[in-house]
């Protein structure tokens, strides 16, 4: 049920991630194809956001490795873009929509360089793509929740990356906006970009995505939507709590256990 | 030495009063500090401390003398105003609380300094001694001052005793306190008032600049020793009192030693000791626990390995040399030898001429680890859909942590399986 | 007409207020105002020790030492917070009171060796700016020494902010995103803290260790209420800083009190005016940031 692909754009090997020694993702093994629109589906607390953060190396992992474009993250950061779930920024920050989108160019610019005119144009263009060009000069707290979401999406677009991670870009947006965004993502994937989206609405999964991951503490399935998004696998993802697993996880935090005792030295 | 005896025999009646005063001030401020600490309002106390300075100065300017009742009233008023302003600024504008605290703290203190220097320049003969509010002057605590400040301290302690239940509920679980109908707003006002009063008395001992230490540090130190609020309060009071006593002693004995900073040094020392050495929560304890876990894993791995070797040869009680072990699994030599020795001492292994053999108990223990390892591998493949060639590493850890209770549930869940995903037999203890 | 002395004092005040305000903009936006407060107290022992070692004030040792002790303070706060699991506010409180106490004790101990006293710690010596002239080896009078020190630090701070503007902005606004695009939040965090420490030390002589906090926080907080654009906020902060210095000086003269105290008072007055007239608006929806200052660093790289 976990389908592997040749020449993957993303390869995850044996990844385990913990918060404060409590594992929340167990042994993820995964490869993903290039140029697809990919959905990550799972219940609350399943570890979807954690998976993306671990891929972006924003939290340390206990074991395993991640390869993007067959390289380590540091080498290809400029080709990757990430939209966090529900931005936890200070909305009173003195910045306009355009300022925020311009931040998408900072990664490419490197140290000491100021954004050039070209960067500003890219930023404006991205705002236009998400239909927010009229709000370019607005301070971000004066935008609605959905509009804020779109600004952060535009920031990701401004990175002009090849691989996008988006953590619930549809949360709290109306149907029309959702349609605009999904059309945008589609056209991006048609241009050969890979877009990985955390998604909660099971109704639309088959319509939106080419490929889907089912996640709940562990990877349950990964493959083309038609063959993977089945009743049985969904049952397994959303039903049946693994109480034993969570008890072991809690025990590890309580006892302060390291997750891996040794990196090498195999025997069994 | 003579000084020590002099000081602690309290033959000198003024020493006696000073000591008594400091003990009262320090313990009462520390007790109130425990509540603000638990309410995560520690730095607000710092702001109040700085903000009482203009009150003290204004009171002095208006009254023209250092009558403690006036000074306390002045301090109390500006202390309260500062709290009100912090709340208003962070509630009514986009300014965040920490900025509001820093703003009020520094501006009020600035006003206080301005007033203080005005008083100094005015040449009022009474003014000498106002400076002691800046860095504290416990030794000046005599006569009327002692009665007034000591009185306030007693009021503080009494109030806290009376409202102990309500206040602790308020700090631990405000929502719950509200839900059972406690007057949360009034209690918060009470706590605020107590904080201001605690600052007012505490600055006598350490001064406004370092007052934060008395509100925060004893409570922080106490937190490392206990989870129980009563014990915590008692400890904080004790730490506060001890540091007050020692600090006063130091400045009594040595010249040029300011009381306030020394009190803070002592209480900080107590706090750092607690951070590092407190049982359970101390930093060292955590480090030691890591070492213990490592040793335990190491020992269990040795038993497991000897068991596995026995499994292969169908005889568990064969003697093995160190190289027999290391060819199978590359243990670091020092750790291996240390583990072997410990296991021998504990009766899990026997040794004869550098040949090591499992005892019956050792075999049982090794067998349990092997069983847990294999059960967990099976669990991972069956319930987590992890490929059989990926489960080993995880099991290497989990085998050391599963409790007998979890073990039983695992067996039941997997229905007492006989082999693991690699077709190795799962040993049961029939 | 302004006397030369008055002019020099106001200039010194402005030279101190401007870098403080500029860095303060980032401090308050990062919700690190109290960390700034802590650092300004904590550098005191560093100043005294550097003084004892080098025998004078304007040595490079002092600025370097300050940078280090500022970073040490930040590190200590984080250490208690992470390793000891002590709540952040308490970690701040414990750390800075301890270091400040050491400073005061050292001053009292070595009173005859260091030209520092408690008054200087409390409100600096800006009134005596003109007294201490910088004289070159051939005897030319170059003007007040303090002005050169403060001016240099101002330049450094401006260069730092110009060069690191976009990194400072993005790590302040959205640290997680900054890490995701490969900008080290830890690096910029510590650089900012070092800059704050160096500025504190340079300002110490003029306004003392505590009132400098007013210059770090009050002008940016006032500007923050007035604008929604970061660059405008910084410009306004500079303007307010100069106004604080100007009006503070005259207030002090009028009342015959400490100039630094009067500057802090005026900073508060400006804030109050702005707060009353424009600050109290319908409170915006403020999404509480989950990350508080020292936790913004997801990992040390
Ligand atoms: N910073 C953290 N510290 C400790 N535990 C955390 C932290 N962040 C997440 N967790 C825990 O890790 C688990 C996975 O969280 P994660 O945010 O990845 O879930 P998710 O699948 O994104 O859920 P949602 O659909 O609600 O966004 C949860 O049990 C959560 O409680
Ligand atoms: Mg999530």
Image (cartoon, rainbow, N blue to C red):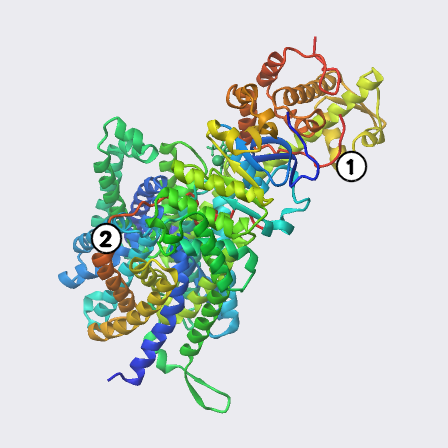
Residue A126's spot in the image, x, y percent? 47, 52
Describe residue C88's horizontal placement relative to residue B24 as left or right: right
Q: Which residue is denoted by mark 2 in the rendering?
A: C280
Say if A191 sits above or below C170 in the image: above
Look at the image and tell me whether residue B16 can be seen: yes
Q: Which residue is denoted by mark 1 in the rendering?
A: B333
Assess disc 2: are there few (<14), some (14-19) or many (≥20) residues with their C-alpha within 10 Å of its C-alpha. some
Residue B38's spot in the image, x, y percent? 36, 39
Which of the numbered marks, if any, corresponds to residue C13?
none
Q: Residue furthest left?
A: B63
Subunit that carries the residue with mark 2: C
Which quadrant would residue A244 be assigned to in this image?
A: top right
Q: Residue at x 29, y 56 (%)?
A: B104
Q: Nearer the viewer, residue B272 or B107?
A: B107
Q: Nearer the viewer, residue B363 or A174?
A: A174
Query: Is the residue at mark 1 from the same chain as the one at mark 2?
Result: no
Which quadrant would residue B417 be assigned to in this image?
A: top right
Secondary structure beneath disc 1?
A: helix
Which quadrant would residue A265 be assigned to in this image?
A: top right
Q: Quadrant of the N terminus of chain C?
A: bottom left
Say if A223 sits above or below B83 in the image: above
């Amino acid at each position: 049920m976990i389908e592997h692909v040749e020449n993957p754009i993303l390869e995850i090997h044996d990844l385990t991630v913990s918060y404060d020694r409590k594992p929340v993702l167990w042994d993820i093994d995964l490869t993903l194809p290039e140029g697809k629109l990919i959905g990550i589906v799972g219940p609350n607390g399943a570890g979807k956001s954690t998976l993306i953060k671990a891929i972006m190396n924003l939290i340390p992992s206990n074991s395993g490795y991640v390869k993007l474009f067959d390289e380590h993250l540091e080498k290809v950061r400029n080709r990757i873009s990430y939209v966090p779930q529900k931005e936890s920024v200070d909305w009173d920050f003195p910045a306009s929509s355009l300022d925020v989108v311009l931040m998408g160019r900072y990664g490419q610019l490197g140290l000491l360089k100021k954004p050039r005119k070209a960067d500003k144009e890219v930023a404006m263009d991205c705002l236009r793509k998400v239909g927010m060009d009229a709000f370019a000069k607005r301070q971000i707290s004066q935008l609605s929740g959905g509009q804020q979401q779109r600004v952060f999406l535009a920031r990701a677009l401004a990175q002009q990356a090849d691989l996008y991670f988006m953590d619930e870009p549809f949360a709290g947006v109306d149907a029309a906006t959702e349609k605009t965004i999904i059309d945008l993502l589609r056209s991006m994937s048609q241009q050969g970009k890979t877009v990985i989206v955390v998604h909660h609405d099971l109704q639309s999964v088959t319509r939106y995505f080419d490929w889907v991951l089912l996640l709940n503490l562990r990877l349950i399935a990964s493959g083309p939507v038609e063959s993977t998004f089945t009743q049985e696998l969904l049952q397994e993802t959303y039903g049946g709590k693994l109480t034993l697993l969570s008890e072991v996880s809690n025990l590890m935090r309580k006892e302060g256990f390291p997750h891996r005792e040794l990196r090498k030295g195999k025997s069994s | 030495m003579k000084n020590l005896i002099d000081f602690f025999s309290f033959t000198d009646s003024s020493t006696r009063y000073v000591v008594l005063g400091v003990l009262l001030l320090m313990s009462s401020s520390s007790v109130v500090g425990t509540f603000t600490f638990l309410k995560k309002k520690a730095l607000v106390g710092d702001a109040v401390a700085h903000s009482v300075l203009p009150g003290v100065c204004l009171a002095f300017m208006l009254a023209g003398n250092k009558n403690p009742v006036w000074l306390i009233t002045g301090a109390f008023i500006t202390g309260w105003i500062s709290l009100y302003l912090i709340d208003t600024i962070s509630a009514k504008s986009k300014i965040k609380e920490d900025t509001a605290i820093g703003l009020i703290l520094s501006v009020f203190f600035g006003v206080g300094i301005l007033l203080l220097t005005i008083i100094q320049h005015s040449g009022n003969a009474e003014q000498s001694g106002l400076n002691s509010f800046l860095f504290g002057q416990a030794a000046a605590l005599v006569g009327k001052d002692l009665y007034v400040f000591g009185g306030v301290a007693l009021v503080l302690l009494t109030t806290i005793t009376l409202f102990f239940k309500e206040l602790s509920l308020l700090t631990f679980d405000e929502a719950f306190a509200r839900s059972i109908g406690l007057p949360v707003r009034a209690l918060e006002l009470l706590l605020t008032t107590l904080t201001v009063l605690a600052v007012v008395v505490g600055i006598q001992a350490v001064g406004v600049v370092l007052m934060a230490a008395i509100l925060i540090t004893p409570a922080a130190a106490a937190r490392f020793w206990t989870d129980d609020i009563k014990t915590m309060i008692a400890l904080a009071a004790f730490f506060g009192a001890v540091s007050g006593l020692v600090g006063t002693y130091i400045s009594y004995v040595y010249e040029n030693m300011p009381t306030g900073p020394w009190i803070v040094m002592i209480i900080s020392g107590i706090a750092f000791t607690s951070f590092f050495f407190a049982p359970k929560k101390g930093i060292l304890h955590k480090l030691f626990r890591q070492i213990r876990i490592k040793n335990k894993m190491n020992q269990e791995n040795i038993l497991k390995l000897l068991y596995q070797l026995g499994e292969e040869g169908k005889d568990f009680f064969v003697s093995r040399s160190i190289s027999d072990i290391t060819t199978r699994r590359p243990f670091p030599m020092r750790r291996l030898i240390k583990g072997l020795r410990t296991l021998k001492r504990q009766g899990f292994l026997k040794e004869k001429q550098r040949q090591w053999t499992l005892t019956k108990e050792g075999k049982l223990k090794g067998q349990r680890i092997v069983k847990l390892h294999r059960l967990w591998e099976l669990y991972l493949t069956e319930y987590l859909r992890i490929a059989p060639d990926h489960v080993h590493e995880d099991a290497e850890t989990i085998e050391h942590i599963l409790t007998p209770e979890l073990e039983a549930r695992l067996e039941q869940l997997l229905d007492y399986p006989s082999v693991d995903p690699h077709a190795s037999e799962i040993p049961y203890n029939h | 007409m302004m006397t030369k002395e008055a002019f020099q004092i106001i200039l010194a005040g402005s030279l101190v207020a401007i870098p403080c305000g500029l860095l303060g903009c980032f401090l308050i936006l990062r919700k690190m105002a109290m960390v700034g407060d802590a650092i300004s107290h904590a550098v005191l022992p560093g100043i005294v020790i550097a003084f004892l070692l080098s025998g004078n004030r304007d040595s490079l040792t002092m600025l370097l030492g300050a940078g280090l002790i500022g970073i040490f303070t930040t590190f200590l706060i984080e250490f208690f917070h992470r390793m000891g699991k002590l709540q952040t506010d308490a970690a701040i409180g414990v750390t800075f009171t301890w270091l400040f106490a050491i400073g005061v004790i050292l001053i009292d101990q070595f009173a005859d060796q260091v030209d520092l006293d408690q008054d200087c710690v409390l409100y600096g010596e800006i009134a005596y700016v003109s007294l201490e002239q910088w004289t070159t080896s051939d005897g030319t009078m170059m003007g007040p020494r303090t002005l050169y020190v403060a001016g240099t630090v101002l330049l450094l701070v401006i260069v730092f902010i110009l060069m690191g503007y976009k990194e400072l902005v993005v790590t302040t606004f959205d640290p997680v995103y900054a890490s995701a695009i490969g900008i080290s939040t830890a690096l910029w965090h510590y650089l900012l803290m070092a800059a704050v420490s160096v500025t504190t030390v340079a300002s110490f002589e003029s306004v003392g260790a505590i009132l400098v906090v007013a210059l770090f926080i009050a002008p940016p907080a006032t500007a923050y209420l007035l604008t929604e654009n970061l660059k405008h906020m910084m410009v306004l902060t500079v303007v307010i800083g100069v106004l604080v210095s100007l009006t503070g000086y005259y207030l002090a003269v009028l009342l015959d009190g400490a100039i630094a105290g009067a500057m802090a008072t005026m900073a508060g007055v400006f804030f109050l005016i702005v707060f009353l007239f424009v600050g109290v608006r319908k409170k915006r929806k403020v999404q509480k940031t989950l990350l508080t200052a020292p936790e913004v660093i997801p990992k040390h790289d």
